[in-house]
Each structure stands twice: as structure tokens, then as C-alpha cells.
Image (cartoon, helix red, strand yellow):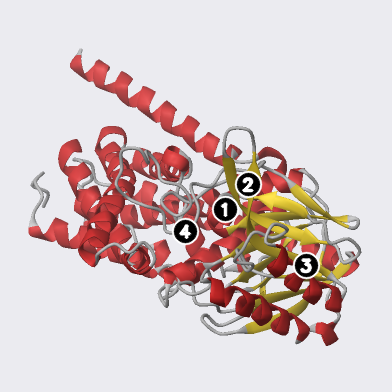
Amino acid sequence: MDTGTINTQKIFFSIVSGLLLTVIFPHSGLHIIAWIALIPFFFAIKGLSVKNSFRVGLITGMVHYISLLYWLVHTMNTYGYLPIWLGIIILVLFSFYLALYVACFSMAIPFLCKKPLLFIATGPALWVLLEHARSYLLSGFPWALLGHSQHNVLNIIQIVDITGVYGISFILAFSNCVLFMVLLYLKKNKWYGTCPSKRLASYSILVLTAILLSTLIYSRYRINEIDNLISDAPKKRVSVIQGNVDQSMKWEPENQKKTVDNYINLSNSVATAGPDLIIWPETALPFYYLYDYKLTGHAQSGFKTLDTYFLVGSPSFIKNAEDIEYFNSAYLIDPERLTPDRYDKTHLVPFGEYVPLGKWLPIGKMVAGIGDFSTGEKGKVLPWGNVAIGTQICYEVIFPDLSRKQVLNNADLLVNITNDAWFGKTGAPYQHFFMTVFRAVENRRSLVRAANTGISGFIDPAGRVISTTQIFEKAAITETIPLLKNNTFYTKHGDIFAILCLIISVISVICSVADNRRKRR
């Protein structure tokens, strides 16, 4: 029976949902739980006021994000040199910010969705709207959206070439809402004074079934279509090199040449595979390529030996009249001419590559040796013969719009170079890697990933993970990848589905306000 107050049972249910929302993601990978993970949370907010519902949502969000992003403490302690207690405080504060999105969702439910039908119709759209907002506000952090949990369910995720990952989030939220209402009907429980009817329970199950069947049919059709395109597409041999270089040592002057030798030796090991392109991770060259002449010459000797294209990560800078601009860059090196094309990272990591409000915050960056980075040109691609490469550095790959803009600029291949050594042996490298699957499917492009400590690997345009490396091991792997050129609906039009969810939410607000006015009259 609902009391309208937060009791021990409601707190327990909110904590359970927070933990369930975490275990659906890699490393644990219990992705099937995503279809029911929100149900305990819905029981927790059932019957609560707007204020108390907000509080319960905050509990669920805090439990989820603290248990999901626990690795931030390790990163800040090991590479930011912050004491563990301060790292824990920052984790709690960051989790509080992210939990506000869950809290806003739960606060909106008693305001907009007091009728069972409105809850089923509007709840999933509200969830997607807030995920979309989290992807952009305050520089954005679309890490571990609900839809990302289904990264390995090929027969579900194909729709993201229309809807983006938000379409998967919508289906999962809709499933949770429908199953929750069916449970209320079976238990004869009320939702804000109204028992869900048998008709609503039956029809909502039918709608959910229809959505799932449509998704499965579309996915099978698209997989077959993409496989046909892959069989006829031009192919390239690509190697990724995972150097497994200790982050705390790579920038030391006495280790810079050793780091280059490590990557050259690993690259030589794949020479017999005949790669058309060899990819080194983010900042694999721990010096300013083309400016540090001795180390540059040493690296170029290795490039010339293999006589193939290289895509390598290195810091860079531009000196102008007033100051020096630093960039986190990727160089595409032509074996015929060692003056390379360059991509500069466009979406920087707060506190990793720049400090927001740096004049007022007494916190330094975790990238040593240089000042704040500057941003490059969004959507820039690197010409590789008659092919164009869209490069994302580090966590740029979690932002769908960056890959989309590169494909609109004719990128035939997506490459993510990163240095996930920051994360240590935690769940973060797995979370980071499997989000890249969605960039491949959204744009129907092969995606190649080179990570200093892993996970490195290859993903085909249907979202299949072709091969991967283990974390914190040296590795060099080669695959033949297809190069598709067709643009998808999502590539052309972006987050129209999320905008549709915004429209549904706005209409719900208008209807709710109008209904409240009628009741007052």
C-alpha cells in the first residue's frame, strides 16, 4: 500500500534498480537484465509526491553511477596524483550530477504520468529526452546510455542506423514500463489511484511484441543487406598495434626511444600479413612528431622499413604571434612522403586535457608536460589514397555526432585511437570499447580501434566484433576490413528520433498543465 512517503522498502527498491542498471554493462555484461532493470525503481516511486519521487530517483542514480564509474578514483589517484579521499569526493559529486538526470525523470513521472496509459506512452520518451540532454549539456557525457547495454545483441541494434542508440534506450524503457504495468494489473495494485485495466495490460503487451518483432525483422533484413554489400565492397588489410606502455613512464625522456622501438618491433611482427595501414594508439609517439628531430628521425626509419601507411597518435602544437596552441593529434603518414596529414582532437576531456574554470579551480590536468589543449576541426577526415579515414581520439568515439559528421565528409573507415591505461584493470576499458559498436552500425562503416593497453579490435558495419585483444598485453593483430560508402538515415539526419521524444514530452507537459487547470476550475 502506498503511503506517499519514502520508507525502507522504497529505498531498497531504488538501490536494487541502481545496481541492476550497472550490471547490464560490461564487464559483467548481464545485458538481458536491462529489459527489467527499472521495474524496482518504478515500484519505489509509485504513489510518491513530485518531491519524494525526485529524492528516490537521486538515490537510484547515485547508486548506479558510483558503482559504474568507480574507476575514476583509481584514475585520479594514479595519474592525477589526488589523494584517494579527494578522488572519492569527486566521484560522489560527479555521480550526483549524473544522478540528477534520473531524478528529473522520476520527478516528471508523478507530474506527467499519473494515468497508467500516460506512463506507458510518455515514460520512455522522457527517459530518452534526458539521455539526449546528458549527451550535450556541460560538454556532454553519453557514457553507458541504457541502449549501450545491448551492444552484442545484433538482432536488436540494427535499428540504430535510423534512430541512433536512443532507439534502443526507448525500447528498453518501454519494456520496463509495460512489464511494470502488467505486474500492477496482476497484483491489483494502483498507480496514483488507478488500477491498470486488463485491456491496457493486454494491448501494451501486444504493442511491445509488435515493436520487438518489427525490430527483429528489420535487423535480419539489414544484416543480410549489409552482408551482401560487404561481400562486394573493396577491402583493405589493417593492423592495430597495442604497445601496452606504462602510462607513468612513457613520457620520461629515457623511455621515449624505448617506446618508439616497442611500436616499431610490434609493427615489424605483422609485416608478413601485408597490411595497407598500421595504426598506433593515442600518443604512441610521446614527443612532438616533426619537431623533436632526433626521435622523429628514429620513428621515420621504422616507417620506411615497412613501406606502408601509418596512423599514429602524437601531441602537436602551433606557434602563433601571441602564444602556443597544443593539440592531441593523429598523423597519417604516407610511405612516399613522410610529411603527414593531421587530425586534431575536437572534443577534449575535462581535467584530462583542459581544466574547466581553470583560473578558479585548484586542480591540475592528468596529461603531463603541457598546458591546456586546443580543439581541432570537427568532421575532418584524412585522405588515404582513394579512401578517407574518420579518426576519433579517446572518448570522442562515444559522441555519435562526431563520427556522423566525418561520414558525411565521405569517411569510408572509422578509426578510434585511445590510451585506456588511465582506467587500469577495471570495467571501464570494456565499457569504452563496446560503445564503439554503435558508431559502426549507425553509419554502416567498419571501425578499427587501437588502444595502448586495450581493448583494441575490429568491428564490421553490422556491429560484429571481428577480433579483439586482451587488456594490458602487448599485441599486434591484422584483419581484412570492408569499406562501405552508402549513407544511412541516421548519418543523413542525426538524432531525429530523440527530437521526436522531445516533442512527445512537450505535448505531455502541455496536456498535464491543461488537465490540472481544468481540475482547479
User: Residue at the spot x=84%, y=61% of the render?
Assistant: 338
Side (left or right) of 42 relative to 288:
left
Question: Element at badge 3?
Answer: strand
Q: Position of residue 412 (x, y in %)?
A: 80, 56
Pointers 3 and 2 in contact (CB under 8 A)? Answer: no
What numbered label is drawn on residue 367? Answer: 4
Q: Amino acid at mark 1?
A: Glu
Work out how far the residue at label 1 is from the one at label 4, CA to CA, in angstroms.
16 Å
Between discs 3 and 4, the one toward the N terminus:
3
Side (left or right) of 149 relative to 51:
right
Q: Position of residue 230 (x, y in %)?
A: 83, 66
The residue singled out by tag 3 in the image is 310
Q: Position of residue 144 (x, y in %)?
A: 45, 58
The residue singled out by tag 2 in the image is 402
Q: Nearer the viewer, mark 3 or mark 2?
A: 3
Q: Nearer the viewer, mark 1 or mark 4?
A: 4
Q: Amino acid at mark 3?
A: Phe
